[in-house]
Amino acid sequence: MAAVGVLALASSLLAACGSDDKSGSTDGLVFMNQSRGQEAALNELAKKYTETTGVKITIESPGPADYLPKLQSKAQSKSMPDIYSSFNATDMAPFYRAGWAKDLSAELQGDWSKNFDPAVVKLSAFADGNNLKVPAGIYTVHWEIQTYGFLADPAATGIDKAAPPQTMDKFIAGLATKGPGKFTVAASLTPQLVQSYASNYLTDEQISQTLDGKLPWKSDGWRKAFQLLIDMKQAGILANNALPGGQDDNPNVESSFFNKKEVGSIFDATAGVSVGLRTAPDFNDYISLALPAAPDATQKPRVIGLNGKGAVINPKGANVDKAVAFVKWLTEPDQQKFFAEKARILPSNPELLKSGTIPGQLTGFAEAIQSMQVLPNTISSDVNTTIIRNTQRLVLGEATVDQVLDEIQAAQDRSK
């Protein structure tokens, strides 16, 4: 039934591609925003832009849980906004394939590209023959770089800010001395955790080839990566001996760390820091950690690198040129700096990254930028869903690592 639903969505989106109908606003510009953490900053910048240029900017923020369903509904009804937030590539690919995103490759050949670290532009590009079957091009621009890692409260975990653990066994052992239930990760983020930890044993090329179906999932590197979750449970540091699941699993995990103080450490993206600022502004005494190395690592660990906050421009909108101008303005250094300070995000501008003005809660994440994974493809939707479901089974003792890898390989084969 899920497959039928995806096909139905793709069909309706593709049908919209052939329409002569003009979507977008005829009264200024509408930006549909997915992010909770950037909402306040985006509203302030939109107001400033309107006051400066006279172009009315309306920000719609349905929230992260409702964002994708509402965007799908707008595509089906041919009422897409002028600008909308980029989401993960797997979920956004149907919109790109259906022609709801302007190819910005030509614009990024010029001076505009100087506003971004070269890795950001590279991460944004879809190459010919990519596994998501998106036409070659660049459909998003980003004022943020995201990585993944651990957030930790030194008071709750005993982690030393000045000397955080450099290996995973020391990280686990340190939390275990503070009693059980000190760490959690949302099931929806286990694909990112596993792929990042697998880099201890696999090169970027080997990871990329696995995601592309050219190498098997059943290898020692992936086996050891999934074993990490079992090790955490056996050490007694996994909260409730389970992985939170459901549509709001990661917001609930972030709440358990920032607001309820139920756990001392979580695995999260850099975006979690901006969520913490919005939901628990008085909680600042926590740190971020780059991914600790496996004790038997053969490679330097490298977290997944991806573009964070950013925008897609609807080429069918009534004011495409105005939309491009506004998005260019949003990515200029002054606006990127405002986003970084107001929303605690890592800017994508190379000069700002070197300036030493990154918020303190992000410094651990920032260390990982230079060595993060930059892959030409991404995990397929079917494989991603299979990992999420099976890591929950793994932690509950309902499946072995090898059984999980067999399930993932079957999903990979179906994705070809």
Image: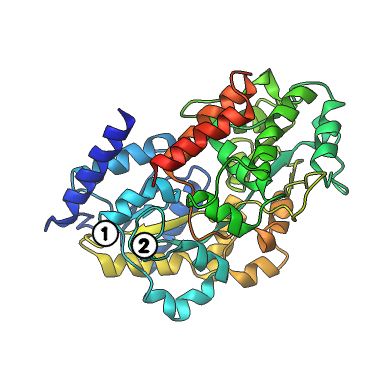
**C-alpha span from label 1 to label 2:** 9 Å
User: Which of 145 and 134 lies nearest the eye of the viewer?
Assistant: 134
Residue 299 visible in image: yes
SS for dot 1: loop
Q: Which residue is painted at 70% across and 37% down in the image?
A: 283
Q: Quadrant of residue 395?
A: top right
Q: Is residue 377 above or below residue 234?
A: below
Q: Which residue is painted at 38% across and 40% down in the image?
A: 67
Whether residue 346 sits left or right of residue 135 in the image: it is right
Whether residue 22 sits left or right of residue 118 in the image: it is left
Whether residue 318 sits left or right of residue 371 in the image: it is left
Residue on which the image places disc 2: 50
Task: Classify the position of the N terminus by image quarter.
Answer: top left
Checking the image for residue 7, the label placed there is none
Q: Could you tell me residue 368's position as x and y percent? A: 70, 56
Residue on which the image places disc 1: 28
Q: Quadrant of residue 278?
A: top right
Q: Is residue 266 above or below residue 122?
A: above
Q: Is residue 40 above or below residue 111?
A: above
**Labels 1 & 2 near each other (Cβ < 8 A):** yes
Q: Residue furthest bottom?
A: 110
Q: Which residue is painted at 35% across and 55% down in the image?
A: 133
Q: Is residue 382 above or below residue 311?
A: above
